[in-house]
């Protein structure tokens, strides 16, 4: 639905990993940004993990959600194949209602690499991004853009 926010997850076909390879991750983020530039979605937050991506987006006016997902995953498919990777069929999506609290979702996405022990509590995960408007309030709740140790228990 146009203007609605969604929590999205895209996964690689198991057991493969590699989305955070230095020669792959920037291309994935570039594709996300290209769709934002075209007005297909507004990325509120995203994290790339080795085998999946989490995002919160607000859908633009030009395409339906399935069309935007195809526009994201489709062009990356050939590039993933050159790395021996492929998308898992489908994706997870949950439309966020105005009554939903965004903080638990942003925390889940932000903490994902730390809880998976891919990043240490004192280091920033390089494949996490948050839109300036959301970071303005959410970033202030973090430990200078890092998780508080109690968040990781």
Image: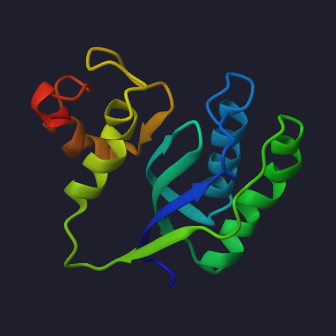
Q: Quadrant of residue 99?
A: bottom left
Name the one closer to the observer, 137 or 89: 89
Q: Is residue 19 left or right of residue 121?
A: right
Q: Is residue 46 rendered to the left or right of residue 144?
A: right
Picture mark count: 0
Please say whether residue 62 is visible from this viewpoint: no
Residue occupying the point 59% across, 67% down: 91
Answer with left or right where residue 75 lies relative to residue 55: right
Q: State the image quarter where residue 65 is shown.
A: bottom right
Q: Is residue 89 visible?
A: yes
Q: Position of residue 121 (x, y in %)?
A: 26, 20
Which percent across, then down, holds residue 94?
42, 74
Q: Residue furthest top?
A: 122
Assign the C terminus to one quadrant of the image: top left
**Picture coordinates of residue 74, whole percent (x, y):** 80, 60
Q: Is residue 150 left or right of residue 5?
A: left
The colour scheme applied to this rendered structure is rainbow
> Toward the viewer: 30 or 92?
92
């Amino acid at each position: 639905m146009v203007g609605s926010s969604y929590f999205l997850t895209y996964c690689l076909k198991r057991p493969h990993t590699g989305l955070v390879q230095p020669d792959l991750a920037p291309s994935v983020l570039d594709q996300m940004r290209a769709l934002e530039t075209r007005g297909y979605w507004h990325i509120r937050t995203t994290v790339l993990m080795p085998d999946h991506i989490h995002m919160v987006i607000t859908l633009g006016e030009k395409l339906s959600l399935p069309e935007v997902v195809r526009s994201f995953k489709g062009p990356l498919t050939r590039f993933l194949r050159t790395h021996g990777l492929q998308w898992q069929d489908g994706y997870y999506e949950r439309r966020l209602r105005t009554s939903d609290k965004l903080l638990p979702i942003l925390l889940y996405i932000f903490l994902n690499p730390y809880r998976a022990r891919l990043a240490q509590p004192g280091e920033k995960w390089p494949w996490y991004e948050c839109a300036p408007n959301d970071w303005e309030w959410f970033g202030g709740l973090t430990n200078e853009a890092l998780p508080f140790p109690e968040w990781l228990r």
